């Protein structure tokens, strides 16, 4: 960051410029920068731009390898028109019209595109194809009817990650004619962003961020927007947002989590911070975080005062998440959504990556896949390059499995229940689209693995769960602060209270151990030393117990919590191993069939050649 940058000070008396004065203990310093130059192209900004794309309220987030064209179209029109109801035509002040479908998104973002990779892409026929946005065809960012969806892929915002203004500009120039705005990602908290030096790992380099935004603002024919995460300090977060606005960002998306809030430390997004950001800037603000149901969208708008609400994980589990709660298909059958997604994939000329197709099916169908590992293996080994019929067979199988569950809850008359005010969750049967809830580990030693689990656990295909009768399969535990989870050793975050972070982990009681203590272990030890301590209690000497443990002995001698964790881990590993073996066996069978087919074709070809030669000889004899 430049040492010559002017400084702003936020104190109890407001915002003022102070040059290079030293701060008092109550003052906070934040850098300011020269205003960006005048844009080379005439374009709308701020609320004029927001209104020009229909004043969108429902926003699909940029998701790596997940918000591809086919998924964006599904998110814009999640249900067939016969089930969804009539669409709406929105006319902007500029005279442009947009088609909005019931329960559909108003604006979508592309997956995060790596600017350098995209610039280096060679186009159709080149080594890298079109990168992550197809320029060879006219579907991405296209209007009209695309993939059977009226209104096409607009409005659309293309998102890039970058740390070089020139490379970012070169990438953005390639798509500016195919989108309504270009967004810069300043929010990705993942390790790949840290290694690549982009996303939230730029948040301490304000001068670079200002340059990235202002470069696009000055040189693109479309507006630039920005998506970012908050700081733990509210004043710094507000100054950060204002800096982006001053650099030229025309819409800000505020994700109410810090960079550190990821994985098992994800917690809940802070809507209060988002509200303060909204109040501090003059451009439209989208809120991001804590969206599982349509009711959350409405509540977020009310609490934050934001202009729109963005969702990622909620959309992946239920692309009809924006459907009004009283609509009969607010939580549509997962198989209906899966079939519609494949319909769109098949209708497009633009190819959809097989990895994206499988990822979406895994997520949509998860409530049922959790009941049978074989179904998951079938999707994983399905050959998408030969068409969608293999996936459709699996979906039809799932439809058959869901019939008794649907009949048990009233058949066609079933309606989603209200959200439980104690937990903030809605109990849904396995055939209905539903959010995946991130489980909170009770400790990092016991159950300390991160999983996305349904809430509550989905019932099996026989309509029962854990041997219980159907009548109990939607019971919600009366626990306000720690709802039950289907993952052993974990609980679910209560949405009735804002999660402010996880307690610091404790070390194992053994003085030389660097392992983590387990909160449910009565000895406050790791699994190894829990077994050693209990072996000593059973009559071993410490030396004997440690020697036996080093050889892999003492299995089963730990506390119930530890041994339960070990058993659960072994069961998971066994399921994975079985899945891999089944996949290998299927691959062998498929390879054998392909060889046999190729051999048969060669023999037929050889017979045809021999027949042709015989006919030629016969014809020559006649001549």
Image (cartoon, rainbow, N blue to C red):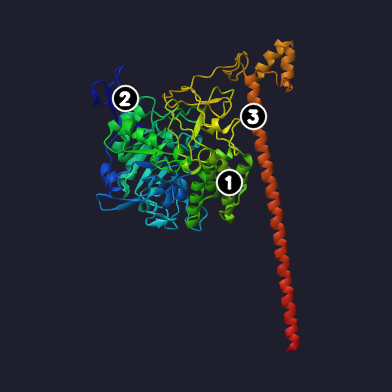
Residue at mark 1 to residue at mark 2: CA–CA distance: 63 Å
Answer whether labels 3 and 2 touch (C-beta < 8 Å).
no
Residue at mark 3 to residue at mark 2: CA–CA distance: 49 Å
Answer whether labels 3 and 1 touch (C-beta < 8 Å).
no
Can you say whether 513 is above or below 616 in the image? above
Tell me the residue at 64%/28% (across/down).
568
N-terminal label among 3 and 1 = 1
Secondary structure, mark 2, is strand
**Local crowd size for mark 3, using a 10 Å CA cut-off: few (<14), some (14–19), many (≥20):** some
The nearer-to-camera label among 1 and 2 is 1
Q: Looking at the picture, how far across and down is residue 309, in whole percent?
A: 36, 38
Q: Looking at the picture, how far across and down is residue 237, in whole percent?
A: 35, 29
Tell me the residue at 63%/21% (across/down).
562
Which is nearer the eye, 463 or 252? 463
Which is nearer the eye, 443 or 420? 420
Q: Looking at the picture, how far across and down is residue 23, in whole percent?
A: 29, 20
- Residue 20 can be seen in this image: no
Number of numbered discs overlaid on the protein picture = 3
**Disc number at residue 29?**
2
| Label 3 sits on residue | 569
Secondary structure, mark 3, is helix
Which is nearer the eye, 81 or 603? 81
**Left or right: where 306 falls relative to 289:** left
Q: Quadrant of residue 235?
A: top left
Q: Looking at the picture, how far across and down is residue 315, in whole percent?
A: 44, 41
The nearer-to-camera label among 3 and 1 is 1
| Label 1 sits on residue | 400
Q: Quadrant of the N terminus?
A: top left
N-terminal label among 3 and 2 = 2
């Amino acid at each position: 960051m430049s040492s010559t940058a002017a400084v702003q000070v936020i104190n109890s008396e407001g915002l003022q410029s102070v040059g290079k004065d030293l701060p008092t203990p109550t003052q906070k310093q934040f850098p300011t920068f020269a205003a960006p130059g005048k844009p080379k192209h005439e374009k709308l900004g701020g609320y004029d731009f927001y209104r020009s794309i229909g004043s969108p309220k429902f926003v699909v987030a940029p998701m790596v390898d997940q918000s591809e064209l086919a998924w964006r179209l599904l998110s814009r029109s999640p249900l067939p028109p016969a089930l969804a109801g009539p669409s709406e035509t929105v006319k902007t002040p500029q005279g442009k019209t947009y088609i909005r479908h019931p329960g559909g998104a108003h604006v979508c973002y592309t997956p995060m595109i790596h600017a350098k990779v995209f610039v280096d892409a060679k186009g159709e026929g080149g080594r890298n194809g079109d990168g992550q946005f197809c320029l060879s065809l006219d579907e991405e960012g296209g209007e009209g009817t695309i993939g059977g969806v009226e209104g096409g892929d607009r409005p659309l915002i293309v998102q890039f990650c970058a740390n070089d203004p020139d490379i970012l500009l070169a990438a953005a120039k390639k798509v500016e004619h195919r989108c309504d705005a270009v967004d810069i990602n300043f929010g990705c908290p993942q390790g790949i962003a840290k290694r690549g030096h982009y996303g939230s790992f730029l948040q301490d380099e304000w001068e670079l961020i200002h340059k990235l935004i202002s470069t696009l603002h000055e040189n693109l024919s479309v507006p630039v927007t920005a998506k970012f995460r908050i700081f733990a300090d509210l004043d710094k977060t507000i100054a950060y947002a204002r800096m982006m606005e001053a650099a030229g960002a025309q819409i800000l998306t505020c994700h109410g989590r810090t960079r550190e809030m990821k994985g098992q430390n994800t917690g809940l997004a802070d809507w209060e911070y988002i509200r303060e950001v909204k109040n501090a800037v003059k451009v439209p603000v989208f809120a991001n975080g804590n969206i599982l149901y349509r009711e959350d969208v409405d509540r977020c708008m009310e609490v934050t005062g934001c202009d729109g609400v963005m969702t990622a994980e909620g959309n992946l589990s239920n692309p009809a998440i924006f459907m009004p709660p009283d609509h009969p298909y607010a939580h549509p059958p997962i198989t209906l959504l899966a079939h519609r997604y494949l319909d769109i994939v098949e209708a497009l000329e633009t190819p959809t990556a097989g990895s994206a197709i499988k990822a979406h099916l895994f997520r949509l169908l998860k409530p049922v896949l959790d009941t049978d590992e074989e179904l998951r293996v079938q999707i994983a080994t399905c050959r998408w390059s030969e068409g969608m019929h293999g996936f459709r067979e699996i979906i039809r199988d799932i439809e058959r499995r869901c019939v008794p569950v649907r009949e048990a809850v009233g058949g066609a008359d079933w309606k989603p229940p209200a959200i439980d005010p104690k937990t903030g969750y809605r109990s849904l049967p396995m055939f209905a689209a539903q959010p995946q809830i991130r489980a909170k580990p009770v400790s990092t030693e016991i159950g300390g693995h991160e999983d996305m689990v349904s809430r509550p656990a989905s019932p099996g295909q026989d309509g029962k769960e854990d041997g219980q009768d159907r009548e109990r399969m939607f019971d919600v535990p009366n626990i306000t602060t720690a709802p039950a989870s289907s993952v052993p050793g974990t609980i679910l975050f209560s949405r009735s209270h804002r999660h402010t972070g996880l307690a610091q982990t404790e070390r194992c009681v053994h003085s030389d151990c660097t392992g983590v203590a387990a909160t449910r272990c009565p000895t406050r030890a790791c699994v190894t030393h829990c077994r050693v301590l209990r072996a000593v209690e059973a009559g071993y000497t410490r030396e004997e117990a440690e020697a036996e443990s080093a050889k892999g002995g003492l299995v089963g001698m730990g506390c119930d919590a530890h041994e339960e964790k070990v058993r659960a881990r072994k069961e998971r590993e066994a399921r994975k191993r079985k899945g891999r073996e089944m996949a290998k066996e299927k691959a062998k069978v498929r390879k054998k069939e392909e060889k046999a087919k190729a051999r048969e074709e060669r023999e037929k070809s050889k017979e045809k050649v021999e027949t042709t030669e015989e006919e030629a000889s016969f014809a020559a004899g006649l001549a």
